[in-house]
Image (spheres, rainbow, N blue to C red):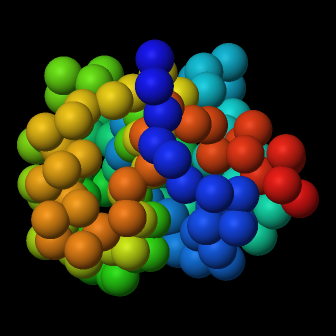
Amino acid sequence: MERDSHTDEEIKQIFALKKIAVVGMSKHSTKAAHFVPKYLSEQGFDITPVNPNADEILGKKSYPNILSLNHSIDVVDVFRPSEQVLPVVRDAIKKKPKVIWLQEGIHNAEAEELARSTGIMVVFNRCMLAEHQRLF
């Protein structure tokens, strides 16, 4: 699967942004959608879980969807199947994040183009944990 063409410098700049909403964050510690945001939280990022099936994850209030967030966010980190990304991106655009990050294995050209057309940077088919460890 292809991935975005961002340089290491551009990816490093994304990691300077600290407020991350994690769509599809999991309560289950064995899933990447749990241990990746847990790692990011341990690295000093402000993680907001977005999961309609959880009230709280990692001691933080979980929101049913991106539009229910009552604070600003810098990055929307998406752990949803590629075919479910478009409605997530449509909602995310309304929150005006700087970046939408589609985790490893996730790619939706229509959703990515929609985000880019509104000025939002898109990263796709990359793992935030792996990229952070590789660059820092």
* Callout count: 0
Going by the image, does 26 lie left or right of 40?
left
Q: Quadrant of residue 98?
A: bottom left
Q: Residue at x 53, y 73 (%)?
A: 19
Q: Nearer the viewer, residue 88 or 118?
A: 118
Quarter of the figure with residue 2: top left
Q: Residue furthest right?
A: 136
Q: Is residue 127 above or below residue 16?
A: above
Is 79 rendered above or below residue 131? above
Q: Is residue 135 above or below residue 30?
A: below
Q: Residue 110's x, y, as percent?
A: 13, 39
Residue 34 is at least partly visible in this image: no
Q: Nearer the viewer, residue 116 or 79?
A: 116
Answer left or right for 33 relative to 29: left
| Image quadrant in which the C terminus is located | bottom right
- The residue at the point 26 percent across, 40 percent down is 52
**Place of residue 16 in the rendered image (x, y in percent of width and height, measured from the top left):** 67, 77
What residue do we see at 85% from left, 47% from top?
133
Q: Position of residue 15 (x, y in %)?
A: 66, 68
State the residue in front, 122 or 43: 122
Viewer-closest of 108 and 83? 108
Which residue is located at x 59 percent, y 77 percent? 17
